[in-house]
Image (cartoon, rainbow, N blue to C red):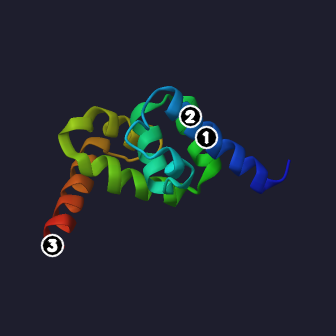
Amino acid sequence: MKRTEAVKSTRQFLIDKLKQEHFLWSFDVNSIQDIPDDVLVELVMLYLDIDEINMLFQLFDYKTVKRAWIENVVAQGERYYNLNYFFAWYYFHAKQPRSYVKAMATRQLNKRLAA
């Protein structure tokens, strides 16, 4: 299987899994296939299991996943603090995950307030 076919099938698998679990209920049926990469990363990280999260790193490069995580998941603040702490430690190898998550959340808040 070619790389592009593998990427398409992995992406489709994740979208199908999110649909199956009813996490795409707010999306128009016709636009689900056009879901932006950062939103796909966010939804997978928030609602699916580690096996599916690991697939994100096959689908996207490390920087893309990390940026989407910081901008879309960490930015939600305290609501997902423990989950973000785990991601910082496990996936992004932060030396002090709690401090890192807090700093990234503050940075995102400041960006949004400045805009």
The tag on residue 14 is none
Q: Residue furthest left?
A: 113
Callouts 1 and 2 close, C-beta under 8 Å: yes
Looking at the rendered structure, the secondary structure element under dot 2 is helix
**Alpha carbon separation for disc pair 3 and 1:** 34 Å
Looking at the rendered structure, the secondary structure element under dot 1 is helix
Instruction: Kindly indicate the quadrant of the structure image that contains residue 61.
Output: bottom right
Which residue occupies 21% across, 67% down?
111
- Number of marks drawn: 3
Q: Quadrant of the C terminus?
A: bottom left
Callouts 3 and 1 close, C-beta under 8 Å: no
Residue 92 in view: no
In the rendered structure, the answer to whether residue 100 lies left or right of residue 65 reads: left
Residue neighbourhood size for the residue with mark 3, other residues' Cα within 10 Å, grouped as few (<14), some (14–19), many (≥20): few
State the residue position of label 2: 52
The earlier-in-sequence mark between 3 and 1 is: 1
Q: Residue furthest bottom?
A: 115
From this view, report whether residue 47 is shown above or below residue 63.
above
**Alpha carbon separation for disc pair 1 and 2:** 5 Å
Disc 1 marks which amino acid? Met
State the residue position of label 1: 55
Name the foreground residue: 115 vs 82.
115
In the rendered structure, the answer to whether residue 103 lies left or right of residue 24 reads: left
Disc 2 marks which amino acid? Glu
Give the x, y percent position of residue 102.
Answer: 21, 49
The tag on residue 114 is 3
